[in-house]
Every structure is written in structure tokens, then in C-alpha cells.
Image (cartoon, helix red, strand yellow):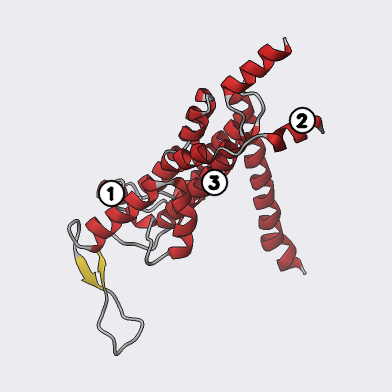
Amino acid sequence: MILAIVDPISFLGWIPFLQPAGALGNLWWLLMFPLILGISIAYRATHDASIDQFWQRVFMFVSKSILAMGSLALVIYLFVYWVIPNL
Amino acid sequence: MTHDNDQLDEPLHWGAAFFGWICPGLGQIMLGHRRRGFLAMTGVLGLFLCGIFIGGVDCVDRREDPLWFYAQAGAGPIAFAADWANSGLLKSGKVGELIESPPSNPRAPAPLVSSFKTVTVASEIGTLYCFLAGLMNIVVLLDAIKRRPIEKDESNEGAKA
């Protein structure tokens, strides 16, 4: 399913910064990773009393956030495709 | 508790907050927290530029998406620059073409929109990136307002020693 995806032709005419990226297909959710990374860098830079081991803390923050969102997505998927049809 | 009281006694650094709005992280840098400021700058500007990269300058639109723009403006003048680029390049037709779009009111003339304007997932996600960059810069600004300047810390430690 995941490999059904991106149409590379749609990226050929893409002008970055002027146009939206071409059809991302089913891979749009991958854009969550840089989003969480940016948020965690800004958050960790201001929240922690010390910025020693900054990148380790950012990595942990990103990992936990992705795990939490992935778990939530799995729960919703099971609810929609398995629980509701069997009610 | 004593630490909290110390923090409450600290003066508010409105100047640092202002310069932090002009350029994300600059407030912390002015207070002597250079590394912290550059990291905050990386996070906020990285989010904003990624948003524009993914969704194009149309992600920032003061007139058509004012509610999104209020938060995006938290990222500073870069948001106004993106809005200016959107108006000056795309909406004016200097880049791309202006094409008629279906009017919401059949009696009204068809509005002209840029051929670069699309309603895609990439456009929505770009808007979200810029929105979150603005909100995160407000967090960074609030931190700059209350953060203790590093020279003062050092002098306090010297006094205690």
C-alpha cells in the first residue's frame, strides 16, 4: 500500500518555495518527522535548565512523540476498520 | 520555592523579546545564551522555511487566511516577507498566470487566482509548519522575557563564592 505512492513526474515541474510540493501520495505523513524535529529543537532549547546532551534529549523527544502518534494512529485504525465493522 | 521567588524578582527583558521577534533566538543571544539562542533559531526558522519549501509562499496569506496568519506572524518579519512575496509575486501574476476560478456567487465576476495556487495536502502541511513556527517562537520569546542574563548569573556566583 505504501509503495503505491509518490508520482515522481509530478515533482519535475515543482518550483520550491513558489509552489506546493507535487503529489505526495500516501507518504504525506512522513512530513510529520521534520515537523516534530523542529518543534523539539525549539522546545528543548528553551525548556531545559541545561543544554548539555541537547541532541540526545531532542532524539528522545522525537522518538516518544512519534511513538505516541503512531500508537494513536494504530488505535484509530483498529477502531475504524475492525471495531466499527464488527459492531 | 526560593528558586521560584528568585525568578519572580527577575526583571522582564522586553527588549530581548522584541529582538527575539525580529529574529528568532536573538533574545537569548542578547542575554548571553548564545548556544541556546542559535538552537532556538534553528528550530523556529527551520520549521518556517520547511513550511514555505513544502507548501510555497501561498502558505502565508494575511488576507485570505487571517487566523492562520495571526499565529504565523509570531515567527517575526519573515512571515510578513512571505506574505509580501505571496501578494507581490503570485497574486499579482508576476510569477505564473492569473486564471479565473469559479465564483462563489454566480452573479459576481469570476475571481482571478494564481495558477500556482493549489489546495493540496502539501499546501495544508506547509501552512501548519509556518503556524507552528510562529507558535514556537512565541514560546521562545516568553523564555527570553524571563531568562536570567548570563553575565548576571556569573556575577551572582562570584558573589556567593
Q: CB under 8 Å between callouts 1 and 2?
A: no
For badge 2, the amino acid type reads: His
For badge 1, the amino acid type reads: Trp
> Comparing marks 2 and 3, which lies closer to the viewer?
2
For the view shown, which residue lies furthest in the right direction?
B1
Labels 3 and 1 in the same subunit? no
Residue drawn where x is 80% and y is 30% of the image: B2
Residue drawn where x is 45% and y is 46% of the image: B75
To which residue does mark 3 refer? B138
Residue drawn where x is 50% and y is 34% of the image: B27
Q: Quadrant of residue A78?
A: bottom right
- Dot 3, how many residues are within 10 Å of its Cα: few (below 14), some (14-19), or many (20+)? many
The answer to whether residue B47 is above or below residue A52 is below
| B16 sits to left or right of A77 | left
Q: CB under 8 Å between callouts 3 and 1?
A: no
To which residue does mark 1 refer? A14
For badge 3, the amino acid type reads: Ile
Q: CB under 8 Å between callouts 2 and 3?
A: no
> Subunit of mark 2?
B
Check disc 1 and report its element: helix, strand or loop.
Answer: loop
Q: Looking at this view, is A48 or A1 the one in front?
A: A48
On the question of residue B99 being in view, the answer is: yes
> Comparing marks 3 and 1, which lies closer to the viewer?
3
Check disc 2 and report its element: helix, strand or loop.
Answer: helix
